[in-house]
DNA sequence: AAGATTGTTGCTTA
DNA sequence: TTAAGCAACAATCT
């Protein structure tokens, strides 16, 4: 499940590989992934290049060099963006080099049966969009629409407007539990189910607590925990719980640092009590009812 | 084999 | 008017 730290890792990876490279070929293997295909998706990209990569929450924004347009990529649950250098030829489900030898890849063979879109650059390198559940999307929009896209998101943790004051302001009027608020992209951008649970564990706050009932101290703990967890997750290149891969097809390392997510029934490493799992905000919610009050 | 998995949208309700 | 809450969606795994 790519959340802010995973999407940020991919952004940074791809920045070092694809910026400024001319796109020479685009193959769409899964039509439904590309939204608004009437805007001639392929012809806009061909002979164009990516000028900059931005991110708001879990959404990647590729600014194109010509045409005042941007390509949005949302990975949803199982989307991947994997870059490979060197020429790739595909035959019978195998990735071959120009001499026909099978290429050994970190993320397995590419393209694979989940590959939906393929971008080829003028240095023969390739970017693959893979999506097992085909839930994500790619869409080209005019830059004039970017403002309304950004407006939908709340405060973004990796910007300098992410301050305790702004955090308090953003959450204080909410009438629901803290877990639902952390997941609400219109309040705070980029936190998903894994990091919401991890943040609340580190803050020592029960996910079911109503925001209105939190003390100033608790709100401060949650804010600081969010900064700490997100930063640490990025340093560890994200969490690969099931499908996530970074921009080079490698797994993230944060999974071994998870304290509650996916640890139902296991012992809390702080107090030894069993980690519990309940349903909150229609999501599986993991917590320690001894450590989180 | 039914139920769980999650991010987002869109609809309904309060 | 605004927000909360819930179903729906997709495809696979248990």
Image (cartoon, coloured by chain):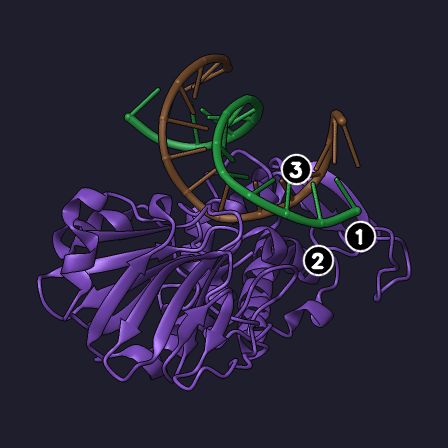
Chain colours: A purple, B brown, C green
The residue labelled by disc 3 is: A280
Residue B14 x %, y %: 50, 15
Disc 1 is placed on an element classified as: loop
Residue A113 x %, y %: 51, 57
Q: Quadrant of residue A235?
A: bottom right
Q: Are marks 2 and 1 in contact (CB under 8 Å)?
A: yes
Q: Nearest the camera: C14 or A52?
A: C14
Q: State whether residue A144 is above or below residue A163.
A: above
Disc 3 is placed on an element classified as: strand
Q: Nearest the camera: A56 or A228?
A: A56
Which residue is at 8% across, 62% downward? A67
Q: Are marks 2 and 3 in contact (CB under 8 Å)?
A: no
| Numbered disc in front, either 2 or 3 | 3
The residue labelled by disc 1 is: A288
Q: State whether residue A108 is above or below residue A2.
A: below
Lateral position of residue A194 relative to residue A133, left or right: right
């Amino acid at each position: 499940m790519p959340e802010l730290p995973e999407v940020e890792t991919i952004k940074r990876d791809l920045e070092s590989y694809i910026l400024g490279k001319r796109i020479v070929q685009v193959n769409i293997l899964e039509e439904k992934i590309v939204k608004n295909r009437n805007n001639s998706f392929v012809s806009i990209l061909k002979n164009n290049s990516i000028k900059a990569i931005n991110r708001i929450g879990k959404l990647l924004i590729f600014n194109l060099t010509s045409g005042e347009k941007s390509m949005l990529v949302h990975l949803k649950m199982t989307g991947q963006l994997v870059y490979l250098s060197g020429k790739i030829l595909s035959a019978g489900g195998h990735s071959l080099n120009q001499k026909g030898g099978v290429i050994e890849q970190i993320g397995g063979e590419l393209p694979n049966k989940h590959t939906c879109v393929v971008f080829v650059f003028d240095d023969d390198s390739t970017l693959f969009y893979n999506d097992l559940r085909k839930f994500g999307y790619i869409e080209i929009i005019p830059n004039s629409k970017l403002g309304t896209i950004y407006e939908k998101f709340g405060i973004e943790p990796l910007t300098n407007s992410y301050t305790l004051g702004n955090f308090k302001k953003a959450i204080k009027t909410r009438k629901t539990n803290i877990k639902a608020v952390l997941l609400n992209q219109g309040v705070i951008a980029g936190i998903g189910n894994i990091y919401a649970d991890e943040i609340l564990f580190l803050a020592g706050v029960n996910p079911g607590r109503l925001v209105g009932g939190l003390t100033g101290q608790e709100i401060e703990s949650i804010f600081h925990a969010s900064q700490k967890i997100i930063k640490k997750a990025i340093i560890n290149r994200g969490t690969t719980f099931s499908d996530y891969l970074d921009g080079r097809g490698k797994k993230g390392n944060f999974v071994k640092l998870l304290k509650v997510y996916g640890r139902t029934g296991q012992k809390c490493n702080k107090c030894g009590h069993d980690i519990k799992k309940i349903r909150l905000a229609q999501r599986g919610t993991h917590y320690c009812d001894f450590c989180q009050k």
